[in-house]
Image (cartoon, grey):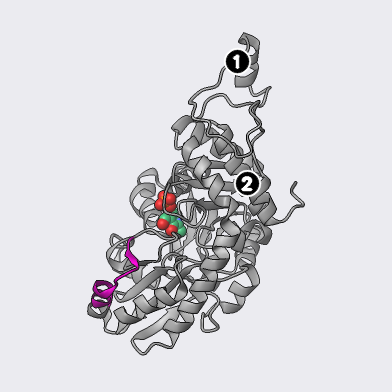
Amino acid sequence: MSNKKFETLAVRTQSETTQFSEHSVPLYLTSGFVFDDAEEMRASFAEEKQRDLYSRYSNPNVNEFVDKVCLMEGAEAGFAFASGMAAVFSTFATLLDAGDHVVSCSSVFGATHGLFTKYFPKWNIECSYFNVNEVETIEGLIKPNTKFLYAETPTNPGVDVLDLAYLSAICKKHNILLVVDNCFATPYLQNPIKFGADLVIHSATKLMDGQGRVLGGVTVGKKELIREIYLFARLTGPSMSPFNAWVLSKSLETLAVRTEKHCENALKLATFLEAHPKVKWVKYPFLKSHPKHDIAKKQMLLGGNIIAFEVKGGLEGGRSFFDAIKMCSLSANLGDTRTIVTHPASTTHAKVEPEVKAAAGITDGMVRVSVGLEHIDDIISDLNQALN
Ligand SMILES: Cc1ncc(COP(=O)(O)O)c(C=O)c1O
């Protein structure tokens, strides 16, 4: 099966058919599973027999979703979570011990930043940030107690791009792990494991679902690391629900076609914005003007669906732009069929300290657009009238 192409794996990776010979995988809404006898129960709990025991540990719908993501990312194993942040937190909590240190890009999702600054210090875990435009400083931040290097690429919300092969070479040299949040790219556009990442995290809430319906998260990568993450999750209970896994597995069937259209629309909108007199700057990985355009082309199939740009006129300019939007949604989510415009400085990154915001390139007038699947003419028309 794994020599098949991405689209085929997305459609044809399915749980075993039941006695009803259904074509589409049913929903396994069950919290537990039954055993034939005491010996089967003992052997199953002792892991001498591989099977589902309890849905906090595994479930046929969740297994199918995880198997698909592993095939898409080229990963050995994975575990699925209730949300992207449950995946981020559980992965960190599994890997880190008190006294450990992490090196991370400063341009990370606001809630991830909150873990590093609000919660990890109380467990004596330290984090050092590097600026995405100064990757030559990374090696100087690595200490004897550094456990892993953490990166988002493209970053949220700055849409900066980090060279995965370069990061991986640093990690190998210093014998630390490379953990990548691949949420903006999706497994269709970028496979960090191919470039040397040890673990890859996704918020499945975004383009993986692509329709703004359910929350979900997943971590995939090296078998021995996933085993530890599984043991942590088994005890702490952040697992994905079977219903969400069923929805998400169906969503993955169309990930490739949806993502291609998202990217086509995003490139057209980014090109339009770049030429607009009311726009100060635009950042989109597949625009030639992106500072890391060459790296984006090397490691991504297409540029993704997120664009960052700055409206002229600072905070006031930004505010009047948002108030004039008619069709697009003002929301903090991204990766939906509906185009969403967000103001990171006052929403997702509102609690981030000003100096960290500046290092992550988040200015007061910055707008993040998650380009949807409406007709591109209507998307451009709405943003154009709002800018004017
Ligand atoms: C890059 C990135 N990582 C993680 C998350 C967290 O995902 P969730 O909202 O599913 O918890 C998000 C959410 O926006 C994100 O953009």
Q: Position of residue 33 (x, y in %)?
A: 55, 21
Q: Amino acid at mark 1?
A: Phe
Q: Position of residue 159 (x, y in %)?
A: 47, 70
Q: Is residue 40 above or below residue 242?
A: above
Q: Secondary structure at mark 1?
A: loop
The quarter of the image holding the C terminus is bottom left
Query: Alpha carbon of mark 2 to alpha carbon of mark 1: how far?
Result: 27 Å
Q: Which residues are magenta?
A: 318-331
Reading the image, the residue beneath label 2 is: 68
Label 1: which residue? 35
- The reply to whether discs 2 and 1 touch (Cβ–Cβ < 8 Å) is no
Closer to the chain start, of discs 2 and 1, is 1
Q: Nearer the viewer, residue 167 or 5?
A: 5
Q: How many marks?
A: 2
Give yes or no for residue 324 being in the magenta stretch: yes
Q: What residue lies at 44% left-to-right and 67% top-to-bottom?
A: 374
Q: Which residue is pictured at 75% across the width and 46% down the height?
A: 1
Q: Give me the residue at 39% from left, 43% from top.
A: 123
- Which residue is situated farthest in the top direction here? 38
Residue 126 makes an appearance in the image: no
Name which residue type carries label 2: Lys
Q: Quadrant of ligand 1?
A: bottom left
Can the viewer see residue 158?
yes
